[in-house]
Image (tube, helix red, strand yellow):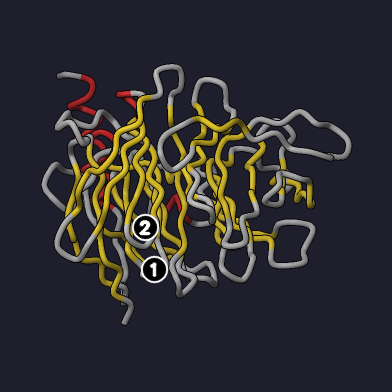
Amino acid sequence: MHKSFARMIVVLLLGILFVSPAVATKIKHRGSVYVDKAGSSLNRPEGVACGEKYFIVADTGNNQMVRYSMTDQSLTPEGTFPLPKISPMITQISTKGDIYILDGKTRTIVKMGQSGQIIGKVEPKGIPGSKTYMSRSFKLDKKGNLYLLDIFSERVLVLDAAEKYVRHVPFPEGSSSFSDLAISDQGSIYILDGVAGAIYVSNPGADSFELLSSNLKEHMNFPTNLAIDSNGTLYLSDQYGSGLALVGRDGSFQGRKFGMGWEEGQLYYPAQLCINKQDVLFIADKNNSRVQVFSILNE
Protein backbone atom coordinates (compact mmCIF):
# COMPACT_ATOMS: atom_id res chain seq x y z
CA MET A 1 0.00 0.00 0.00
CA HIS A 2 1.31 3.47 -0.91
CA LYS A 3 2.54 5.32 2.21
CA SER A 4 0.56 8.51 1.54
CA PHE A 5 -2.63 6.51 0.95
CA ALA A 6 -2.08 4.56 4.15
CA ARG A 7 -1.56 7.81 6.06
CA MET A 8 -4.84 9.18 4.68
CA ILE A 9 -6.69 6.06 5.86
CA VAL A 10 -5.26 6.49 9.35
CA VAL A 11 -6.29 10.15 9.42
CA LEU A 12 -9.81 9.28 8.31
CA LEU A 13 -10.10 6.65 11.03
CA LEU A 14 -8.87 9.15 13.60
CA GLY A 15 -11.55 11.55 12.43
CA ILE A 16 -14.19 8.88 13.00
CA LEU A 17 -12.93 8.31 16.54
CA PHE A 18 -13.21 12.00 17.45
CA VAL A 19 -16.71 12.47 18.86
CA SER A 20 -17.60 16.17 18.86
CA PRO A 21 -20.18 17.92 20.98
CA ALA A 22 -22.77 20.17 19.35
CA VAL A 23 -21.31 23.47 18.22
CA ALA A 24 -23.43 26.64 18.15
CA THR A 25 -21.09 28.25 15.63
CA LYS A 26 -22.02 27.56 12.01
CA ILE A 27 -19.55 27.93 9.17
CA LYS A 28 -20.85 28.47 5.63
CA HIS A 29 -18.65 27.96 2.58
CA ARG A 30 -18.44 31.11 0.41
CA GLY A 31 -15.93 30.06 -2.22
CA SER A 32 -12.41 28.90 -2.98
CA VAL A 33 -9.49 30.19 -5.04
CA TYR A 34 -7.28 27.87 -7.09
CA VAL A 35 -5.39 30.10 -9.54
CA ASP A 36 -3.40 33.32 -9.63
CA LYS A 37 -4.03 36.32 -11.90
CA ALA A 38 -2.33 34.59 -14.86
CA GLY A 39 -4.55 31.53 -14.44
CA SER A 40 -1.74 29.33 -13.11
CA SER A 41 -2.62 26.89 -10.33
CA LEU A 42 -1.68 27.63 -6.74
CA ASN A 43 0.92 25.20 -5.39
CA ARG A 44 0.62 24.09 -1.74
CA PRO A 45 -0.14 27.53 -0.24
CA GLU A 46 0.78 27.74 3.45
CA GLY A 47 -0.25 31.29 4.32
CA VAL A 48 -3.24 33.61 4.07
CA ALA A 49 -3.81 37.12 5.44
CA CYS A 50 -7.16 38.88 5.23
CA GLY A 51 -8.63 42.35 5.12
CA GLU A 52 -12.22 43.50 4.72
CA LYS A 53 -12.32 43.55 0.91
CA TYR A 54 -9.25 41.59 -0.09
CA PHE A 55 -6.89 38.83 1.03
CA ILE A 56 -3.30 37.78 0.36
CA VAL A 57 -2.12 34.21 -0.24
CA ALA A 58 1.41 32.94 0.37
CA ASP A 59 1.63 30.61 -2.63
CA THR A 60 4.54 28.71 -1.14
CA GLY A 61 5.20 26.15 -3.87
CA ASN A 62 5.29 28.85 -6.54
CA ASN A 63 7.41 31.28 -4.48
CA GLN A 64 4.94 34.12 -4.89
CA MET A 65 2.23 36.14 -3.19
CA VAL A 66 -1.22 36.48 -4.77
CA ARG A 67 -3.73 39.20 -3.95
CA TYR A 68 -7.50 38.65 -4.36
CA SER A 69 -10.39 41.08 -4.17
CA MET A 70 -13.48 39.91 -2.36
CA THR A 71 -17.17 40.76 -2.70
CA ASP A 72 -20.29 38.91 -1.60
CA GLN A 73 -20.44 37.31 -5.04
CA SER A 74 -16.84 36.76 -6.10
CA LEU A 75 -13.21 36.10 -5.19
CA THR A 76 -11.01 37.55 -7.94
CA PRO A 77 -7.20 37.40 -8.38
CA GLU A 78 -5.93 40.94 -8.98
CA GLY A 79 -2.20 40.76 -8.49
CA THR A 80 0.65 38.23 -8.49
CA PHE A 81 3.99 39.09 -6.89
CA PRO A 82 6.89 36.68 -7.59
CA LEU A 83 9.41 36.05 -4.80
CA PRO A 84 12.06 33.83 -6.42
CA LYS A 85 14.47 34.04 -3.47
CA ILE A 86 11.86 33.66 -0.72
CA SER A 87 9.79 30.71 0.49
CA PRO A 88 6.67 32.54 1.75
CA MET A 89 4.87 30.90 4.67
CA ILE A 90 3.01 32.83 7.36
CA THR A 91 1.74 36.22 6.17
CA GLN A 92 0.01 39.23 7.72
CA ILE A 93 -1.32 42.61 6.53
CA SER A 94 -0.29 45.69 8.52
CA THR A 95 -2.56 48.58 9.46
CA LYS A 96 -0.91 50.54 6.60
CA GLY A 97 -1.62 47.79 4.08
CA ASP A 98 1.94 46.49 3.84
CA ILE A 99 2.41 42.73 3.63
CA TYR A 100 4.61 40.93 6.15
CA ILE A 101 5.92 37.51 5.10
CA LEU A 102 7.78 34.85 7.08
CA ASP A 103 10.51 33.41 4.84
CA GLY A 104 10.67 29.67 5.50
CA LYS A 105 14.30 29.52 4.37
CA THR A 106 15.82 32.17 6.63
CA ARG A 107 13.10 32.52 9.30
CA THR A 108 13.24 36.27 8.78
CA ILE A 109 10.19 38.47 8.22
CA VAL A 110 10.18 40.30 4.90
CA LYS A 111 8.09 43.42 4.28
CA MET A 112 6.38 44.01 0.94
CA GLY A 113 4.52 47.11 -0.23
CA GLN A 114 1.00 47.03 -1.62
CA SER A 115 2.30 47.03 -5.19
CA GLY A 116 4.56 44.03 -4.55
CA GLN A 117 7.92 45.74 -4.01
CA ILE A 118 10.18 44.49 -1.20
CA ILE A 119 10.69 47.31 1.29
CA GLY A 120 12.93 45.60 3.85
CA LYS A 121 13.02 43.14 6.72
CA VAL A 122 11.84 43.31 10.30
CA GLU A 123 14.82 44.38 12.42
CA PRO A 124 13.93 44.61 16.14
CA LYS A 125 15.46 47.54 17.99
CA GLY A 126 16.38 47.81 21.66
CA ILE A 127 15.92 44.18 22.71
CA PRO A 128 17.45 43.70 26.19
CA GLY A 129 19.67 40.69 26.88
CA SER A 130 19.92 38.16 24.06
CA LYS A 131 19.18 39.78 20.72
CA THR A 132 19.13 36.45 18.87
CA TYR A 133 15.69 35.32 17.80
CA MET A 134 14.08 32.91 15.35
CA SER A 135 10.47 33.38 14.33
CA ARG A 136 8.26 30.32 14.01
CA SER A 137 5.22 32.54 13.47
CA PHE A 138 4.06 36.10 14.08
CA LYS A 139 0.96 38.28 14.31
CA LEU A 140 0.11 41.97 13.97
CA ASP A 141 -2.54 43.56 16.18
CA LYS A 142 -4.93 46.38 15.33
CA LYS A 143 -2.45 48.99 16.63
CA GLY A 144 0.34 47.73 14.39
CA ASN A 145 2.26 45.99 17.17
CA LEU A 146 4.22 42.92 16.06
CA TYR A 147 4.24 39.70 18.11
CA LEU A 148 7.04 37.25 17.26
CA LEU A 149 6.86 33.62 18.33
CA ASP A 150 10.58 33.35 19.10
CA ILE A 151 11.49 29.66 19.28
CA PHE A 152 15.21 30.38 19.77
CA SER A 153 14.93 32.39 23.00
CA GLU A 154 11.59 30.74 23.92
CA ARG A 155 9.44 33.82 24.28
CA VAL A 156 6.85 35.98 22.58
CA LEU A 157 8.65 39.16 21.58
CA VAL A 158 6.46 42.28 21.30
CA LEU A 159 7.53 45.19 19.08
CA ASP A 160 5.73 48.42 18.27
CA ALA A 161 4.92 49.60 14.74
CA ALA A 162 8.44 51.07 14.46
CA GLU A 163 9.89 47.64 15.41
CA LYS A 164 11.10 48.93 18.78
CA TYR A 165 11.11 46.53 21.73
CA VAL A 166 8.06 46.85 23.99
CA ARG A 167 8.24 43.73 26.16
CA HIS A 168 8.48 39.97 26.03
CA VAL A 169 6.65 37.09 27.66
CA PRO A 170 8.65 33.89 28.27
CA PHE A 171 7.23 30.53 27.22
CA PRO A 172 5.80 28.49 30.11
CA GLU A 173 8.29 26.10 31.70
CA GLY A 174 8.26 22.55 30.41
CA SER A 175 6.81 23.48 27.01
CA SER A 176 8.73 24.55 23.93
CA SER A 177 6.96 23.07 20.87
CA PHE A 178 4.93 26.16 20.06
CA SER A 179 3.79 26.59 16.47
CA ASP A 180 1.48 29.61 16.37
CA LEU A 181 -0.08 32.47 18.32
CA ALA A 182 -3.18 34.65 18.22
CA ILE A 183 -3.94 38.10 19.65
CA SER A 184 -7.41 39.06 20.85
CA ASP A 185 -8.87 42.54 20.36
CA GLN A 186 -8.42 43.05 24.11
CA GLY A 187 -4.70 42.25 23.92
CA SER A 188 -4.58 38.68 25.26
CA ILE A 189 -1.84 36.52 23.73
CA TYR A 190 -2.62 32.87 22.98
CA ILE A 191 0.08 30.36 22.05
CA LEU A 192 -0.41 26.84 20.72
CA ASP A 193 1.67 23.80 21.63
CA GLY A 194 0.61 21.32 18.95
CA VAL A 195 2.79 18.48 20.20
CA ALA A 196 1.32 18.56 23.72
CA GLY A 197 -2.12 19.62 22.49
CA ALA A 198 -2.32 22.67 24.75
CA ILE A 199 -3.16 26.37 24.56
CA TYR A 200 -1.69 28.96 26.92
CA VAL A 201 -2.84 32.54 27.46
CA SER A 202 -1.20 35.71 28.73
CA ASN A 203 -3.86 38.28 29.55
CA PRO A 204 -3.28 42.04 29.22
CA GLY A 205 -0.72 43.24 31.74
CA ALA A 206 0.51 39.73 32.60
CA ASP A 207 4.21 38.86 32.32
CA SER A 208 3.70 35.09 32.01
CA PHE A 209 1.50 32.48 30.37
CA GLU A 210 -1.03 30.26 32.09
CA LEU A 211 -2.59 27.05 30.83
CA LEU A 212 -5.95 27.57 29.13
CA SER A 213 -6.66 24.15 27.60
CA SER A 214 -4.71 20.89 27.87
CA ASN A 215 -6.94 18.13 26.50
CA LEU A 216 -6.76 18.90 22.80
CA LYS A 217 -5.07 15.60 21.89
CA GLU A 218 -8.34 13.89 22.77
CA HIS A 219 -9.98 15.71 19.87
CA MET A 220 -7.20 16.56 17.42
CA ASN A 221 -4.26 14.84 15.81
CA PHE A 222 -1.77 17.69 15.35
CA PRO A 223 -3.05 21.29 15.60
CA THR A 224 -0.62 23.78 14.08
CA ASN A 225 -2.28 27.14 13.40
CA LEU A 226 -4.45 29.46 15.43
CA ALA A 227 -6.96 32.28 14.83
CA ILE A 228 -9.61 34.04 16.92
CA ASP A 229 -13.05 35.42 16.01
CA SER A 230 -14.95 38.44 17.35
CA ASN A 231 -16.56 36.33 20.10
CA GLY A 232 -13.20 35.15 21.41
CA THR A 233 -13.56 31.62 20.04
CA LEU A 234 -10.24 30.06 19.01
CA TYR A 235 -9.96 28.19 15.70
CA LEU A 236 -7.24 25.57 15.24
CA SER A 237 -6.23 23.93 11.97
CA ASP A 238 -5.63 20.22 12.63
CA GLN A 239 -2.93 19.55 10.07
CA TYR A 240 -2.68 15.77 10.24
CA GLY A 241 -6.35 15.37 11.13
CA SER A 242 -7.32 17.55 8.14
CA GLY A 243 -10.02 19.45 9.98
CA LEU A 244 -10.82 22.51 12.05
CA ALA A 245 -11.36 22.56 15.82
CA LEU A 246 -12.97 25.22 18.00
CA VAL A 247 -12.02 26.12 21.58
CA GLY A 248 -13.98 28.54 23.75
CA ARG A 249 -12.44 31.52 25.52
CA ASP A 250 -12.64 29.48 28.74
CA GLY A 251 -10.55 26.70 27.19
CA SER A 252 -13.44 24.30 26.64
CA PHE A 253 -13.49 22.20 23.49
CA GLN A 254 -16.36 23.34 21.26
CA GLY A 255 -16.22 20.71 18.52
CA ARG A 256 -14.74 19.91 15.12
CA LYS A 257 -15.64 21.14 11.66
CA PHE A 258 -15.08 19.68 8.21
CA GLY A 259 -13.18 16.50 7.42
CA MET A 260 -10.54 15.16 5.11
CA GLY A 261 -11.26 15.33 1.40
CA TRP A 262 -11.06 17.25 -1.85
CA GLU A 263 -14.60 18.61 -2.21
CA GLU A 264 -15.51 22.16 -1.21
CA GLY A 265 -15.76 22.37 2.57
CA GLN A 266 -13.26 19.56 3.11
CA LEU A 267 -9.57 19.95 3.96
CA TYR A 268 -6.28 18.20 3.31
CA TYR A 269 -3.37 19.33 5.52
CA PRO A 270 -4.68 22.83 6.34
CA ALA A 271 -2.13 25.49 7.29
CA GLN A 272 -2.58 29.18 8.24
CA LEU A 273 -5.97 30.55 9.24
CA CYS A 274 -7.20 34.14 9.12
CA ILE A 275 -10.42 35.74 10.40
CA ASN A 276 -11.28 39.33 9.43
CA LYS A 277 -13.43 41.90 11.24
CA GLN A 278 -16.57 40.60 9.52
CA ASP A 279 -15.89 37.09 10.86
CA VAL A 280 -14.99 35.74 7.45
CA LEU A 281 -12.69 32.73 7.83
CA PHE A 282 -9.88 31.97 5.38
CA ILE A 283 -8.04 28.63 5.36
CA ALA A 284 -4.85 27.85 3.44
CA ASP A 285 -5.85 24.35 2.33
CA LYS A 286 -2.26 23.36 1.62
CA ASN A 287 -2.39 19.91 0.06
CA ASN A 288 -5.51 20.75 -1.94
CA SER A 289 -3.56 23.72 -3.38
CA ARG A 290 -6.31 26.23 -2.71
CA VAL A 291 -7.60 28.72 -0.15
CA GLN A 292 -11.15 28.29 1.08
CA VAL A 293 -13.33 31.13 2.38
CA PHE A 294 -16.18 30.74 4.88
CA SER A 295 -18.66 32.92 6.76
CA ILE A 296 -18.79 32.37 10.53
CA LEU A 297 -22.36 32.49 11.82
CA ASN A 298 -22.39 32.77 15.61
CA GLU A 299 -25.76 31.96 17.18
How far across and down, in percent of the image, does residue 27 sit?
A: 25, 66
- In the image, 188: left or right of 284? right
Task: Determine the secondary structure under disc 1.
Answer: strand
Quadrant of the rendering where the N terminus is positioned = top left
Q: Is residue 109 left or right of residue 170?
A: left
Q: CA distance from mark 1 to mark 2?
A: 7 Å
- Badge 2: how crowded within 10 Å, few (<14), some, or many (20+)? many
Q: Is residue 270 above or below residue 109?
A: below
Compare residues 51 and 264 and report the one nearer the observer: 51
* Among the 4 quarters of the image, the one containing residue 28: bottom left
The numbered disc on residue 246 is none
Looking at the image, do the residues carrying marks 1 and 2 touch, with CB atoms under 8 Å apart?
yes
Position of residue 281 measured from the top left corner of the image (x, y, whole percent): 33, 59
- Image quarter where the C terminus lies is bottom left
List x then y, in percent, for residue 14: 28, 45
Label located before the other in sequence (1 or 2)? 2
- Image spot of residue 248 (x, y percent): 47, 70
Q: Is residue 54 left or right of residue 288?
A: right
Q: What's the residue at 59%, 57% (across, down)?
A: 190
Residue for point 38% across, 45% down: 48
Quadrant in the picture for residue 12: top left
Amino acid type at circle 1 is: Gln
User: Measured along the vertical axis of the image, is residue 13 above or below residue 198?
Assistant: above
Most extreme residue toward the bottom is: 299
Residue at 24 percent across and 50 percent down: it is 292
Q: Which residue is mark 2?
A: 245
Q: Which residue appears farthest toward the left when viewing the image?
A: 263
Residue type pointed to by label 2:
Ala
Vertical arrangement, residue 86 with respect to residue 277, above or below: above
Closer to us: 172 or 265: 265
The residue that mark 1 highlights is 254
Q: Secondary structure at mark 2?
A: strand
